[in-house]
Image: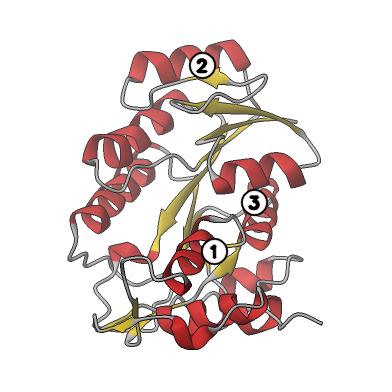
Amino acid sequence: MRILVTGGSGELGREIRRVARHEVVACYNSVPVDGGVRVDVRRRDEVEAAVQEVRPDAIIHTAYLQSDWVTTADGAANVAIAARGIRLVHVSSDALFSGKDSPYGEEAVPDPITPYGAAKAAAETAVRAIDPTAVIARTSLIVGGGRIERWVRGLVKGGPGALYTDNIRCPIHVTDLASALLELLESGHAGIAHVGGADAVSRHELGQLIAVHEGLDPTKLPTGSNPSDIRLDSTKTQDLLKTHLRGVREFLTPPA
């Protein structure tokens, strides 16, 4: 199987390339990837040209830009159109929920309260309309790719920012997420799948766990408040998978 991965230079894209048992061709925009194809997902002609060039058996769409509607929403539609007839997994986000009715199962209706959440909701609507057989995999904070860890290290050193004590999510390890997406790709599943970690924690608790895991002082992490409880119920998806969707308390153990 040949898999085309958009956002191939990002944390998740890199991990999919690392763990996949199949040939993976990465699409990238600003950060080159060896053997990859440069594609601006905002341009439908470029996406279609890449699909024609690579001729993949499947596509995993991970590309997004939090501050840009066109990349996140229109880009997803462009990929779904180009992927017609090709197995598609679209990576979505818990950001399309407001937090008013947590925990959220797959049947929950998006009610976004941020521009990014609205863009992700629009992307899902487009993908489902264009390809009802596609997998739409909603996930949460991704740990293990380096970005969150760098943020926590900076905060411990006195860098700007704070970690919210009342902002709840279900973080997932990047390896678990990549493996789950590849399993879903090969499955007969269609529609929504929730792929979050087993533990619901605040951003501050997540930061503390990362700090202890890395041998840093968790008491140096600054706290803040931004009430939001968005927990993904991933029970149904876990029943489909061999991949164990670990909770952060399982994979962020203190150093030996």
Of callouts 2 and 3, the N-terminal one: 2
Residue 199 % position (x, y): 55, 83
Instruction: Give the labeled residue for mark 2.
Output: 50
Q: In this image, 84 relative to 227: left or right?
A: right
The answer to whether residue 185 of the structure is visible from this angle is yes
Q: Are marks 3 and 1 in contact (CB under 8 Å)?
A: no
Disc 1 packing (10 Å; few <14; some 14–19; many ≥20): some
Task: Please name which of the two marks, 2 or 3, marks the residue nearer to the observer.
Answer: 2
Q: Is residue 46 above or below residue 149?
A: above
Q: In this image, 4 relative to 38: left or right?
A: right
- Please tell me how many numbered marks the rendered image carries: 3
Q: Nearer the viewer, residue 131 or 179?
A: 179
Instruction: Give the labeled residue for mark 3.
Output: 188
The type of residue carrying mark 1 is: Glu
Taking the spot 71% from the left edge, 83% from the top edge, the residue there is 254
Quarter containing the N terminus = top right
Per the model, the C-alpha gap separating discs 2 and 1 is: 33 Å
Residue 231 % position (x, y): 42, 79
Residue 153 % position (x, y): 51, 67
Taking the spot 70% from the left edge, 47% from the top edge, the residue there is 186
Quarter containing the C terminus = bottom right
The type of residue carrying mark 3 is: Gly
The type of residue carrying mark 2 is: Ala
Per the model, the C-alpha gap separating discs 2 and 3 is: 25 Å
Q: Is residue 221 above or below residue 65?
A: below
Instruction: Give the labeled residue for mark 1.
Output: 149
